[in-house]
Image (spheres, grey):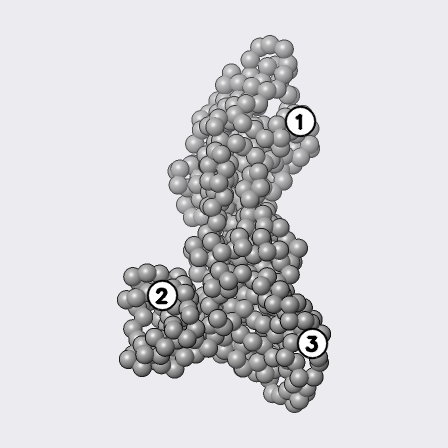
Amino acid sequence: MLACVRTAAVFGIDACPVQVEVDVSRGLPMFQMVGLPDASVRESRDRVRNAIRNSGFEFPLSRITVNLSPADVRKAGSSFDLPIAIGVLAAAGHLPQRDLSRLMVLGELSLDGAIQPARGVLPIAVAARRLRATGLILPQPNHAEAAVVEGLPLYPVSSLAEALSALDNPQDFSRQSCVAPTTTATPVTFDGDFSDVHGQTMARRALEIAAAGGHNVLLAGPPGAGKTMMARRVSTILPPLTFDEALEATSIHSVAGLLPAGAQLLSERPFRAPHHTISDVALVGGGQYPRPGEISLAHHGVLFLDEMPEFSRHVLEVLRQPVEEGCVRIARAARTAVFPARFMLIGAMNPCPCGFLGDPHRPCRCTAQQVARYASRLSGPLRDRIDLTVPVAAVAPRELVDAQPGEPSSAIRCRVIAARDRQLARDGRLNARLHGRALRSRVVLEPAARALLSKALERLSLSARGHDRVLRVARTIADLQGADRIDAPHLAEALHYRGD
């Protein structure tokens, strides 16, 4: 007898529908799987066999053939366990005959029949609604995650027996199942605030500009100047995630398996701070079966690279294309996975290997060659993609002891949100994403600003990319002040942060 069950495989952050065809026929007992299953899928034979027996059902001693269609798509992961088990029971005649082809099923089985949470449930739920599935049977811990997709009946189950009950009486089961949680984002609370930062007026201003326009920043200063402290507080001045942004960011975290049980949409913008020993694959994503890297996990948030020159040169160079394009394309023989990576890059570095170059109180012991070699760890093309380079001086002892608290994050955040609203109303995107004709049409320079830019291009030897990035930063500075046109002070401040 033949039975067909519908499920899905995740490639990148998209779900591809998969048909699980199970045939139980006469012959020597065997369990064969075809359709490009990887090792984790082939191992499901033992999990399915023991889960069926320990759930009180008889496992058929027959010739069992499982085909995962389409056969040219590699299947990976353990979420195929439940659809295979249901297909085996249906083909063996243990389930009443019904059409299972329009119902989508996923879940990993334990040997006792319990169902474990799965990765990538949110993209699969989106695909199920797009394919007009009549419902989605999924693990109970993933219910909140899938509930954000409206118009899709959900059947959260905790065991194989519950899944069969949902198939027998879907109407009664849906009434007995828990109520779908709300999708309202919970208020975000932060551990730190910009009021904790004493002094550092220039760095605070640069981070406000960067947050308002989505620009990249490099903080350069001695150890203990507060670079890491300020970078970790950037999240407190960013606006909350929109629904579409939260959906994209949550899908990436779901595919990576980083969503805790019972989690819904992310309510806080991601902040990722990988260690400098990270590999290039872990940073940008990849692997035999592509998974998102740190830059994709920072999508719509902040990627902070502390001690940036200590990262491998090759690791830093792979950032160049994602910083420009806002996505990562990982090509494999069968297909190409595209991961979004629209993040705000914040880097921090010391002025020299010992960190005390230019410090009036602590002498620098580095040679000129050591200083030059240290600075060259950040290549010219990568520096050219950083909009604001900010020198961060050590905080004077008097400022630490006597200074009043700085401006709170709430006040800075109001200005950032107002500037972003101006950009979105004008262009539908942030200034950091303006390119080509859109940049030329939106950046209107006053005569004094145009003359200043001409002199700066000659004196600073700016590249074409550097020229465009200066204009984007100047446009953001003007937006923070509510100005429609860019004047000389706006452009002068942008050039001051250029650092070329």
Q: Position of residue 122 (x, y in %)?
A: 50, 46
Neighbourhood count class around disc 3 (C-alpha, 10 Å): few under 14, some 14–19, many 20 upward: some
Towards the viewer: 430 or 144: 430
Towards the viewer: 105 or 479: 479
Q: Position of residue 308 (x, y in %)?
A: 60, 63
Neighbourhood count class around disc 1 (C-alpha, 10 Å): few under 14, some 14–19, many 20 upward: few
Provide the secondary structure element on which disc 3 rests: loop
> Residue at (41%, 79%) from the top-left corner?
492
Provide the secondary structure element on which disc 2 rests: helix
Q: Which residue is mark 3?
A: 364
> Residue at (66%, 55%) from the top-left corner?
277
In primary-sequence order, the first of circles 1 and 2 is 1
Q: Which residue is mark 1?
A: 46
Residue 424's disc is 2
Instruction: Tell me how far mark 2 sits from mark 3, CA to CA.
Output: 46 Å
Neighbourhood count class around disc 2 (C-alpha, 10 Å): few under 14, some 14–19, many 20 upward: few
Q: Position of residue 134 (x, y in %)?
A: 43, 36
Instruction: Tell me how far mark 1 sits from mark 2, CA to CA.
Output: 54 Å
In primary-sequence order, the first of circles 2 and 3 is 3
| Residue 379 shows in this picture | yes
